Image (cartoon, grey):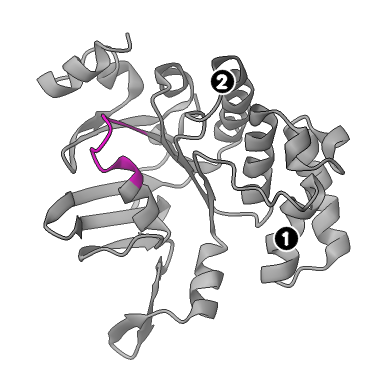
Amino acid sequence: MNQSTTRHDTEASILVRAHNVHKSYGEHEVLKGIDLDVHKGETIVILGPSGSGKSTFLRCINHLETMQAGSIMVGEDQIGYQLKGNKLFHATPSVLAQQRKNIGMVFQQFNLYPHLTVMQNIIEAPVGVHGEKRQHAEAYAYELLERIGLVEKANSYPRQLSGGQQQRVAIARALAIKPKLMLFDEPTSALDPELVGEVLAVMKNLAAQGLTMIVVTHEIGFAKEAADRVVFMDYGKIIEQGPPNEILVSPKQERTKAFLNRFI
């Protein structure tokens, strides 16, 4: 576990600040006023039952979902908006793309382009979206493939990889833009059980290296080993949060206890 919680206690250290976030689909309110600060270098694991709003909150952070109320800042940016004078306006597509350059996201499904090789998948955003020179993008892609243990698969196509390998490539693709923040939305839920460990190992290494991460998962072992803080959500609210050895071992709320009894 990285020990960022002992270091990050100042305003300047906050990378993500969510305040009073509300999100509804029609009459159904999914998020009911979420407040959460995430410090630079911190690994946050969000736990909770299906339908509690975990993934929706994650998608609001990089503006894949639009909030009805509240605000989310990542660094100096309110993602999806730009300040003109004293007023906030919806960001243009080019501004939004630039804001998202600071945020990498890994989904449940791997979403790799099937017609592109592993290398082509990884360099697609740096070269095609952000205008990086191909030579530089490929050099960094090889570094990332070394980190995830898949250099030999650089010229393979997604269909030639196992599910675990595809998800590791998806992580490398998200890292290729050199984000300040990584979001993981249940990255192991679509994997066969024997493939889960290889993906979690990559994520643990990222946490140990001090990358700021917010992870939605049911992997309690990962939360114990890699998280600085565990956040438990239910019915669109944060029920409680704290260090793993508190939330996972002796939670204060009965709802948290009932949930964890299913896994521990």
Residue lying at 84% horizontally and 42% vertically, measured from the top left: 154
Contact flag, marks 1 and 2 (Cβ < 8 Å): no
Q: Quadrant of residue 74 in the image? A: bottom left
Residue 213 placement (x, y as % from top left): 48, 41
The residue lying toward the viewer, choosing from 91 and 4, is 91
* Whether residue 253 is visible: no
Q: Secondary structure at mark 2?
A: loop
Quadrant of the image for the C terminus? top left
> Viewed as shown, does residue 67 lie left or right of 254?
right
* Whether residue 16 is visible: yes
Residue 235 placement (x, y as % from top left): 15, 39
- Please give the residue where the numbered disc 1 appears in the rendered image: 124
Image height of 188 relative to 112, above or below: above
The residue lying toward the viewer, choosing from 12 and 155, is 155
> Viewed as shown, does residue 247 lie left or right of 97?
left
Marks 1 and 2, how far apart in space?
28 Å
- Please give the residue where the numbered disc 2 appears in the rendered image: 192
Image height of 122 relative to 214, above or below: below
> Viewed as shown, does residue 34 lie left or right of 60?
left
Q: Which amino acid is tagged 1? A: Glu
Residue 149 placement (x, y as % from top left): 77, 29
Q: Which amino acid is tagged 2? A: Asp
Q: Which residues are magenta?
A: 46-55
Q: Quadrant of residue 94 in the image? A: bottom right
